[in-house]
Image (cartoon, rainbow, N blue to C red):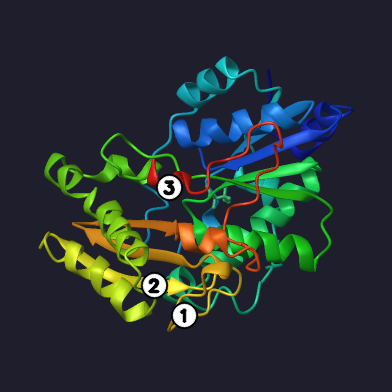
């Protein structure tokens, strides 16, 4: 495994790696990241990973300085996965001095996380554009955990014709349902015990849907009722939205694979989670409905189940 820092070193090492599966990360890797690496490994000749805590996607007052970092541990994990090349740029390798260009993806960044973290998705879109241009991947891999980010990246790649395939892999969860995240490390023992309530709230919406409810208000109420059982959880939003436009829905159209997402604070830690409502048996019988709901899986040899979130 080669580890490079500058763009020139990257360009030389990138050379002829054949088809490249690229996993951009901010480090402090967990099994969710490794599932992206494994998906990239299965479908490409080579795997390239970047580790870069991107300052432009942190709003003032967010956790840029305290974001967890452990490069040695990350590199050992990637080596064990057979990764070919790791890019660990410094800030100046990504943003040359005087750099002032920002990439803005309109519309889908105005809601949900974008509405609460102004500038966040400009930072994500800008760094991903730079990383994609430097790495020149065949495919890039993202986790469904950051559901809105996947919508933004798909739109970015399509609008700017960046010439790569965006692959989205299912959320990886701890045994108690908590979605894996580098930020889980911030949770105190007591908060960690409470945190799986986010997943239980999503499952409550899913259960209400499976029971035949189609009004967004019913599904959201089911999720809120579960969240309310844990007073330590400060809910920022629970949303039921179209999976492509992220427009809030009044009523579920099963053919559109609605996205239920939420954000909540537990003490000083902000957590997000989401779930794509799985079709019911009746939905599946209705072959006239096209399902846009499942994350696109780039590895045809190992398709994801209909809703891996429920696992
Ligand atoms: O999802 C992340 O870890 C980051 O937003 C990404 C895509 C690596 C860009 O910094």
In the rendered image, which quarter is residue 115 located in? bottom left
Check the image and report above or below for 304 versus 132.
Answer: above
Task: Specify which label sits upstream in the sequence, 3 or 1.
Answer: 1
* Local crowd size for mark 2, using a 10 Å CA cut-off: few (<14), some (14–19), many (≥20): many
Q: State the residue position of label 1.
A: 248
Quadrant of the rendered image containing residue 128 = bottom right
Q: Quadrant of residue 121?
A: bottom right
Are the residues tagged 2 and 1 within 8 Å (C-beta)? yes
Relative placement, left or right, of 230 versus 75 is left
User: Can residue 114 be seen?
Assistant: yes
Identify the residue position indicated by label 3 in the image: 309
Disc 3 and disc 2: Cα gap in Å? 17 Å
Residue under label 2, please give it: 239
C-alpha span from label 3 to label 1: 21 Å
Looking at the rendered structure, the secondary structure element under dot 2 is strand
Examine the rendering and report whether any part of residue 279 can be seen.
Answer: no
Residue at point 77% right, 30% down?
A: 44
- Asked if disc 2 is less than 8 Å from ligand 1, the answer is no
Quarter of the image where the C terminus is located: top left
Residue 91 at x, y percent in the picture: 61, 47
In the image, 178 versus 29, the foreground residue is 178
**First-in-chain label (2 vs 1):** 2
Expressed as whole percent of the image width and height from the top left, the position of residue 178 reads: 30, 44
């Amino acid at each position: 495994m080669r580890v490079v820092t500058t763009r020139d070193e990257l360009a030389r090492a990138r050379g002829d790696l054949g088809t490249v599966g690229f996993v951009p990360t901010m480090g402090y890797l967990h099994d969710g990241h490794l599932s992206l690496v494994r998906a990239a490994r299965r479908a490409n000749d080579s795997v390239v990973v970047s580790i870069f805590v991107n300052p432009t996607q942190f709003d003032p007052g967010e956790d840029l300085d305290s974001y967890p970092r452990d490069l040695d541990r990350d590199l050992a994990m990637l080596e064990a996965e057979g990764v070919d090349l790791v890019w660990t740029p410094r800030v100046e390798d990504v943003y040359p001095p005087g750099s002032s260009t920002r990439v803005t993806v309109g519309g889908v960044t105005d809601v949900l996380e974008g509405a609460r973290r102004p500038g966040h998705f400009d930072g994500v879109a800008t760094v991903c554009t730079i990383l994609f241009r430097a790495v020149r991947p065949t495919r890039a891999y993202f986790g469904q955990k950051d559901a809105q980010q996947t919508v933004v990246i798909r739109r970015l790649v399509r609008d700017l014709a960046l010439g790569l395939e965006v692959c989205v892999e299912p959320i990886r969860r701890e045994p108690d349902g908590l979605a894996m995240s580098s930020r889980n490390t911030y949770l105190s023992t007591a908060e960690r015990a409470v945190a799986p309530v986010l997943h239980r709230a999503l499952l409550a919406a899913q259960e209400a849907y499976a029971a035949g409810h189609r009004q967004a208000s019913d599904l959201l109420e089911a999720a809120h009722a579960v969240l309310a059982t844990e007073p330590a959880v400060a809910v920022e939003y629970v949303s039921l939205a179209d999976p492509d436009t992220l427009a809030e829905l009044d009523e579920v159209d099963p053919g559109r694979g609605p996205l239920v997402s939420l954000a909540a604070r537990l003490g000083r830690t902000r957590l997000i989670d989401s779930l794509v409502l799985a079709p019911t048996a009746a939905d599946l019988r209705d072959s006239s409905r096209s399902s846009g709901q499942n994350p696109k899986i780039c590895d045809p040899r190992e398709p994801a189940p209909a809703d891996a979130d429920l696992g």
